[in-house]
Image (cartoon, rainbow, N blue to C red):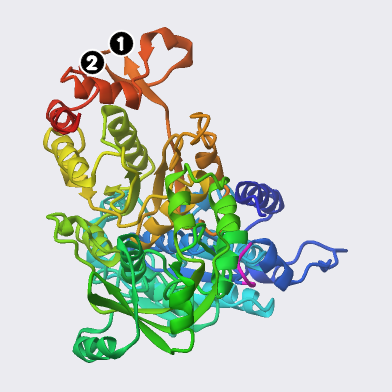
Amino acid sequence: VINYQFTTTFLHSWLLDMAVNEVPSTNGLDIVRSTNVFTQLSHITRKKRGQIVGADGFRGCCVWFTGLSGAGKTTISFGTEEYLCSVGVPSYSLDGDNIRQGLNKNLGFSPEDREENIRRISEVAKLFADAGIVILNSFISPYIRDRDRARKLNEDAGLPFFEVFVDTPLNVCEDRDVKGLYKKARAGIIKGFTGIDAEYEAPIKPDLVLKAGEWSEDECVQKVVELLRSNGILPPDYKNQVYELFVSPDKVQTVKVEASTLPQLHINKLDLQWVQVLSEGWATPLKGFMKEREFLQCLHFGNLLDGGLTSQSIPIVLPLTTKDKERLEKVSALSLVYEGRPVAILRDPEFYPHPKEERCCRQFGTSNIGHPYVKMIYESGDWLVGGDLECLERILWNDGLDEYRLTPQELREEFKKRKADAVFAFQLRNPIHNGHALLMKDTHERLLARGYKRPVLLLHPLGGWTKADDVPLPVRIRQHHEVLREGVLDPNNTVLAIFPSPMMYAGPTEVQWHSKARVAAGATFYIVGRDPAGMPHPDTKENLYDPSHGRKVLQMAPGLTQLEIVPFKVAAYNKKKGAMDFFDPEKSDDFEFISGTKMRTLARNGQEPPSGFMAPKAWQVLVEFYQNNK
C-alpha cells in the first residue's frame, strides 16, 4: 500500500534539494551538472506495482492539463481524481499553485523559470506514473516545447502521456477571475501574465480538447475518463453505471406473453422485495439471483470476484422447495409469479443446495432461530435457484409511498439537478431524533469546510421487511417529513427516499451491503451509526454484535473504495444545554442517554421527552402510533 502523503512529501523535499542550487537556463533540459551518476534499475516490475497499489493492473500514466489561468484545469483534474479513486484506481493531482508553494517555490515567472518549473514537474510526473499512479498535472505550461519535452520524458520511459487542452476562451477566464489575477494583470500590477502580456502557445495536436467554457465539470471529467478507457488505462468494466434489469419498453408486451407460457415459480413478499432490489440496480453488477459461484464468493469472501473486486457481503438468493426444483430443473427459463401475476423471467436457471446452517453462521454469526431472519431462512426451501433476471415492469406497492421509492438512476438525476458535488447517505430504520440530525448537519458543515459547494444529504430509510417491533415504514416517513417541515434538517439540501432492501439484522456484515448499495445511487460519503444493523441476542438479550464493529469494519472493507466512511459521533441529551449534543466523557454528568425503550415508553404513555430531544410534531407522530398500538 502506498502512503501518498509520505510519497509526495519525500518527492517534494528530495527534488527541491536537487534543484535549489541549479541556475535556471533557457535550455534547462540540456544542462547536466551531475557527474559520476549511474541509473539504478528496480527489481520490481510494473505489473507487480500495479498489484501492490490495488489497481487490478498497472495504470501508471500522465494526464497533462494545459490552458489559461481560470480555464478549469484544476477543477477538472480534481474531479477526475475523485472519480478514479472512487473506482479503485490510484491517482494524484499536481496543481501549479500547490507545487510553487513547495518544490518550486524558488522559481519565478520568467521564461527561464517557467521552463524549469515544467522540467521539474515532468520528472515528478514520471516518478508517480512509474509507481503505477495516474498522475493528473494542472499547469498553464504555456510553451509547446516544454510540453513536448514532458511527453518525450514519459514516453521514453514507456509511460503513456496524454495532453489535454482545456480550451476556455480568454474572455470567459477573465469573467471567472476567481483569484483576481486578470484584474491585477490588466492594471499592470502583475507582469508577464499568460494571455495578457505573455504568450500562450495552444497545443497543435492534443490528445483531448475540453470546451470547459461550454461543458459542465462532469461532462469534462467523463471525457477524460473515456480517453483513459479508450487507451487501455481503464478496463471497459470501470464504468460509473447501474445495471437495471427491466425489460425494454418496446419488448414488454412480447415478454409478458412469453412469461404467461413459461413454467411458474411462485414467490413471496420477501422474494419480491429482492426482485425490486436487483431490477433497480442496487446490487450492480449482479444480473439476477446468485448462481452458486457468486453465492460462494459472497459467503466466503464478502465480495464478487469476476470482472474485478466488488463488495457484496450478503447473499441475494431465491429459495425453492425440492418439489419445485424437481419440477423446474430441466427448463431454460421460468416465470416468477407473485399473487397470481408474473413479475419477472429468470433465464438460464441454475439449481443448487441451500446450505442454511453455513449461510446463517457466516452471515449472522449465529444459527439461532430466535433471530427473525435466520428463522425465515430455515423455513425457506432446501434449494436455491440463480439466473439472469428480466423484470417485466417496475415493482410498485401501491401503498401511497411509491413516489419515495426512487431508483439509483432517478436519485443520480436528482443529485445532478441539484448540482450536488458531494452526496452523503444516512440509512436508518428508526425515527429521527435531534441527535441523528446533529450528526447529519455536522457532516454537511465538515464537507463545506473541505471545499465542497453543494453537499446533499440522502436521507434513506430502509423500506423492505423489518421485524415486528420496529416502527412501520409509513409512520417513519410521516415522522421524517415532520423533521423536515420543522427545519431540523434543511429540505433544500436533503433528498428523502426509500431504500427497498429487506432488513436482515446481520450487523457488520449487513452494513457493508447498505453502504455498497448507496454507491449505486451516487453517494460518495456514508454515515455509519452505532451498532448498525444490530439487535439483541435472542437468548441473552445482550448485543448480538459489538456496537463499534460496524464502523471499524466499514473503514477497512475491501471493495468499498468508492465511499468515504463518516464515523458516527455519539450524541446524548445535554441537560445543561437542553439539547442533543456530542457526548463529552469529561462532562458525563451533564448528559443523559435516552434509550429506545425509554422513548417508546414515553410515547405510549403520551408523555413528552426532554425539550430538544425531537422535533415536537415529529414526536406527536410517534405518540399517535404507539397509543393506537398499545
Q: Is residue 60 visible?
A: yes
369 or 424: nearer the eye?
Answer: 369
Q: Amino acid at mark 1?
A: Lys
Residue drawn at (37%, 83%), measured in percent from left and top? 334
Tags 2 and 1 touching, CB below 8 Å? yes
Within 10 Å of disc 1 (Cα), the crowding (few <14, some 14-19, many 20+) is some
Image quarter of residue 195: bottom left
Give whichever of discs 2 and 1 has the lower sequence position.
1
Instruction: From the image, tell me which residue sits under label 2.
Output: 610
Give residue 176's position: percent from left, percent from top: 24, 57
Q: Locate the N terminus by quadrant.
A: bottom right
528 or 456: nearer the eye?
Answer: 528
Q: Left or right? Give the position of 122 relative to 108.
A: right
Q: Amino acid at mark 2?
A: Pro
As measured in the structure, the alpha-carbon distance from the residue carrying label 2 to the one carrying label 1 is 9 Å
Give residue 144's position: percent from left, percent from top: 49, 76
Q: Locate the C terminus by quadrant.
A: top left
Callout 2 secondary element:
loop
- Using the image, determine if residue 308 lies above or below residue 112: below
Give residue 472's position: percent from left, percent from top: 24, 43
Q: Left or right? Give the position of 588 relative to 474.
A: right
Instruction: From the image, tell me which residue sits under label 1.
Output: 575
Q: Left or right? Give the position of 460 relative to 99.
A: left
Give residue 309's position: percent from left, percent from top: 56, 66
